[in-house]
Image (cartoon, rainbow, N blue to C red):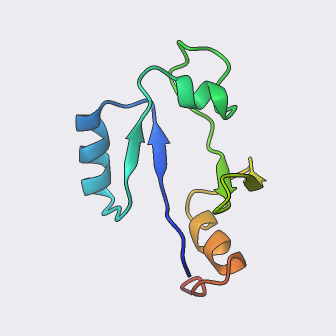
Amino acid sequence: MNVQILGASFDTPKENADFAKKFDYNFPLLCDTTRSLGMAYGACDDPKAQYAARITYVIGADGKIEKVVDKVDAKSHPFTLLEELGGAKAPK
C-alpha cells in the first residue's frame, strides 16, 4: 500500500517529538503552532484554540480530499482506516 501518514497538532516541535517518542509513532507529526492548518481543515475555528479536533483526511495522489472522518476513535481508527484502504488487518 502506497500511503503517507502525517499527524498534526498545535504543539511545539519539542512537545511533538516527546509525544511521538512516548507512543512510538513511526510517522511525522507536523507542528501547527499558528493554527493555520487547523483552521484550514476545520479542526478548530479560532486561532487561539487550545486543542484541535481529531479529524482524518485521506488525500489522493492528485491532492484532492477523498475521504473525511470527523468522529475518530484514537485506538481503533488507524487500523480500521488502513484496512479500508487495503492494508493489513487490525490486530485482535
Q: Residue at x 41, y 24 (%)?
A: 33
The vertical placement of 89 against 30, above or below, is below
Q: Nearer the viewer, residue 19 or 3?
A: 3
Q: Residue at x 45, y 20 (%)?
A: 34
- Which residue is situated farthest in the front direction here? 62
Where residue 37 appears, as percent x and y from the top left, is 55, 31
The vertical placement of 80 against 5, above or below, is below
Q: Nearer the viewer, residue 45 or 22?
A: 45
Q: How many numbered discs sit on the rendered protein?
A: 0
Image quadrant in which you'd find residue 3: bottom right
Q: Nearer the viewer, residue 92 or 82?
A: 82
In the rendered structure, the answer to whether residue 42 lies left or right of residue 91 reads: right
Where residue 65 appears, as percent x and y from the top left, is 73, 52
Q: Residue at x 50, y 21 (%)?
A: 50
Q: Where the C terminus falls, by quadrant?
A: bottom right
Image quadrant in which you'd find residue 53: top right
The vertical placement of 75 against 63, above or below, is below
Q: Where the N terminus falls, by quadrant?
A: bottom right
In the rendered structure, the answer to whether residue 13 lies left or right of residue 31 reads: left
Where residue 76 appears, as percent x and y from the top left, is 61, 68
Where residue 90 appears, as percent x and y from the top left, is 59, 82
Q: Residue at x 60, y 83 (%)?
A: 87
